[in-house]
Image: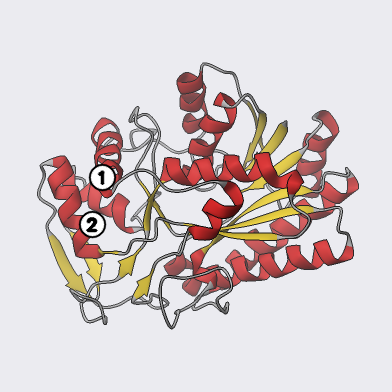
Amino acid sequence: MSILVTGGAGYIASHTSVLLLKEGHDIVIFDNFCNSSSESIRRVESITDKKITAIEGDIRNRDDLIKVFDKYDIDSVIHFAGLKAVGESVDIPLKYYDYNLSGTITLCQVMKEYNCKSIVFSSSATVYGDPHTTPIKENFPTTATNPYGRTKLFIEEMLRDIFISDNEWKIVLLRYFNPVGAHISGTIGEDPQGIPNNLMPFVAQTAVGKREYLNIFGDDYDTPDGTGVRDYIHVMDLAQGHVDAIEKINSFDNVMTINLGTGNGYSVLDMVRAFEDASGRNVPYKIVQRRDGDIATCFADPSYAKEILGWEAKRSIREMCEDGWRWQSNNPNGYNNGEDKK
């Protein structure tokens, strides 16, 4: 199968590309590198011993996409491309609607023109908003507490409308929870620009000495220790979910919405302690004000993924932290050692 991986140089996409290549799929990576590094592609090539076709382009640019579909016979798309920081989306919502919504509209228009009607979409548990109960099932009501989450929700609805208009489309919406960790080799991992928006890169950068301390946003939530509880999932388990989805997509006769999580909730302080144990390093922290858009508790009911895809998360919180630390300690400044990313 020939698969276009949009945003393919990014964190989750690069790990997914490793597994796609190992399963024998041909991939074309498409990325504008606005929040990723082309070095990740070179390292995926090293891990898999395979050459990757990588094209620089923007999903909002129709001409960029047409060049790809003209040159390559694309069977399916795994759509990762987009902006992803909750806090930033609150500050600059129009940028998020432009990149995420406008980009996906343009992508789907070009796919339709080239009769490529198969897409796995990188959605998010943020579409559940602030759930009234946990674990979260796929049939729970959807809403969003921030612009980032709304872009994911709007794209999901748009894809469902596309299917209603033309049921030849094959669409899988993967709602995943909190990816952490890295490839076991320690050569690819999460490399955020500037101050990390997600917990574990901040924890890792603090442990390696790049940052003085970790900010914990609130300790007065209705949780066992007052800090936010999330479903942390190893990025390689998450990557396997994408491979399973793309390999089974043609067997589905409706839009499939699937949670990818472990079903376990861990607090921020749980993760800090686990990382300290795995790394042997102290992670100093300060409690600061809650962030806009954050919720108290969020973890998945992953049973539908096992039923439909035969998928389940296998790696422990210990492995998440050990692999994350291996990446961070081997690459204290990320892919480019502080140089400009490209």
Answer above or below: position of 105 versus 67: below
Q: Nearer the viewer, residue 137 or 88?
A: 137
Does any portion of residue 70 appear in the rendered image? yes
Q: Which residue is mark 1?
A: 321
Q: Residue at x 74, y 52 (%)?
A: 252
Q: Quadrant of the N terminus?
A: top right
Answer above or below: position of 248 versus 40: below
Q: Quadrant of residue 339?
A: top left
Q: Quadrant of residue 328?
A: top left
Q: Residue at x 26, y 80 (%)?
A: 221
Type of amino acid at the residue the image marks with label 2: Met
Q: Picture coordinates of residue 53 (x, y %)?
A: 65, 26
* Residue 297 circle label: none
Type of amino acid at the residue the image marks with label 1: Cys
Answer above or below: position of 265 versus 307: below
Please say if the residues under marks 1 and 2 sit with CB atoms less than 8 Å apart.
yes
Q: Residue at x 30, y 35 (%)?
A: 327
Report helix, strand or loop for mark 2. Answer: helix
Q: Earlier in the sequence, mark 1 or mark 2?
A: 2
Badge 2 density bin: few <14, some 14–19, many ≥20, Cα 10 Å = many
Q: Which residue is mark 2?
A: 271
Would you say 232 lies left or right of 307 here? left
Report helix, strand or loop for mark 1. Answer: helix
Would you say 93 lies left or right of 315 here? right
Q: Nearer the viewer, residue 11 or 66?
A: 11
Badge 1 density bin: few <14, some 14–19, many ≥20, Cα 10 Å = many
